[in-house]
Image: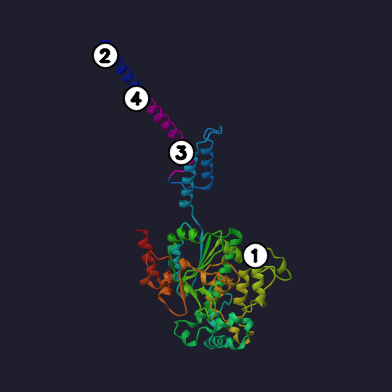
Amino acid sequence: MHQATTLRLQGKRSRRAQSFNVAKTKIVIFFLSAFWLFSFVNHQSSLLSLHTPSHAEKWDPLSLASAAIVAQDPVGKGSRVPDQVDLLRAAAQTQLERHSKISIDIISVGSHARPIYQEAQERFFGPKDSVRNFFRITEEDDTEADCSSKLTTSQLEKVVTFCKSRSRVLGEEFFHLKQMATHYARVQWLNKKANAIGWLCAQKRPFDGLVKALGAYRAQGTPDYLLVLDDDSWVNIDQLEVSLPSMYPAKTPYAVAGCMLRSRVREHNFTFPYGGWGMIFSRSAIENLMKPLFCYNTTDRIEDEFLRLACWRLSENSIGEQKVFREGMSVAQLMHAYVTDQPYQQVDSWNSVGYCLHSDWVWGYFANFYHISVHANTPYFSQVLEDRLQGFNGSEIYTGRRTPANDQLRRECRNEGDDMCTKNSNICHYVTPQHMEKLAWQLSR
């Protein structure tokens, strides 16, 4: 019995010793693992401190590539820790997306009669890091240089009368021009304006501004986005810096209206920007505007889809633009040539087409029918080749029957006047310089 008791006690002691040894081994493994982990993290941190910019610096593709290479081969001998590399790449991509600045150019269409509007825009938009150029366009840039000072009221009335008659005079080959001319400004409506002659002359001014901006791009390259605005428009640049790349990537051709109008579908399937909410062109769309067109006797051999469609539209001659085209012209040059071909002051000698478009219609026609942009993919118009223009964030006004569903689409179009334009608005129209200053102050707090 005593021997059995002794054996049991020895067994207990052996098991206790084994348990103690196991526990001791686990503790040793824990501390060794902790030491190895600390050493590894410290090594990777030292590498990142050498190859990662500080918070005060900006990430750039070269430094990101350098950091990625170091992570893939930290000691230069082919060693690699997959999880660490993946984390580094993800962090690098996040930082790149967060800190990369887009470039934006702004064309402000205004008048020397109220310079404080463009001064306010340049003051509050211009200093932004993303804004590369701010082009002030006024009467001094007009191709028809003395239009505002010499056009008479009699000539203005003749322009209106001429254009209103185009729906009866022109044939069906000019269907789109006839539809637009039907809605040309009436004399009664123009007389309500503070400066009717100034308004009429300004209908050509945006395209003088466009040619001026595109001329600058030959030397400095194209921006990621080009905004064309009236001088009483407000844009929240900080918000656009975030929304534009995600909604309308610069590498894809987009022509976007700050607020888009859609004509009555059964009357005229046509979309165009609404007034001073302006236009936004992505870099790829700008490049489409600048591409030279070689159309004569080469249509069947053109491989580039954009060029082929543009030449086909030119052959359609829907608004009479073919007469001003010269081989090698770009779409932007064609637009400008069409707009400036028939001076207002020479209305008595206009040809059968004249110039009977508001500036918004010019943007709409060339953006849609010359396929400057990708297809808008509007469900109802998916089969309409020229459905290209888009409203910013889907902002749209339908000029037909008003319904609750149509009203929901207005979005940015509601931002009209000081009372409706807040610091959270993306784009507004009819904003005073005083309110621009107020908005800038609110956003800076």
Q: Which amino acid, by three-letter code, is at mark 4?
A: Ala
Viewer-closest of 292 and 138? 292
Highlighted magenta segment, given as a residue range: 27-54
The residue pinned by badge 1 equals 305
The residue pinned by badge 2 equals 5
Q: Which amino acid, by three-letter code, is at mark 1?
A: Glu
Image point (35%, 23%), residue name: 24
Name the spot of residue 79 as percent of width and height, x first.
Answer: 53, 33
- The 10 Å Cα crowd at callout 4, few under 14, some 14 to 19, many 20 or more, is few
Question: Whole-Å distance between the Cαs marked 3 and 2?
Answer: 66 Å
Q: Is residue 34 magenta?
A: yes
Position above or below: 346 against 83:
below
Position above or below: 151 against 245:
below
Instruction: Classify mark 3: helix, strand or loop.
Output: helix
Looking at marks 2 and 4 on the same chain, the residue that comes earlier in the sequence is marked by: 2
The residue pinned by badge 4 equals 23
The label shown at residue 49 is: 3
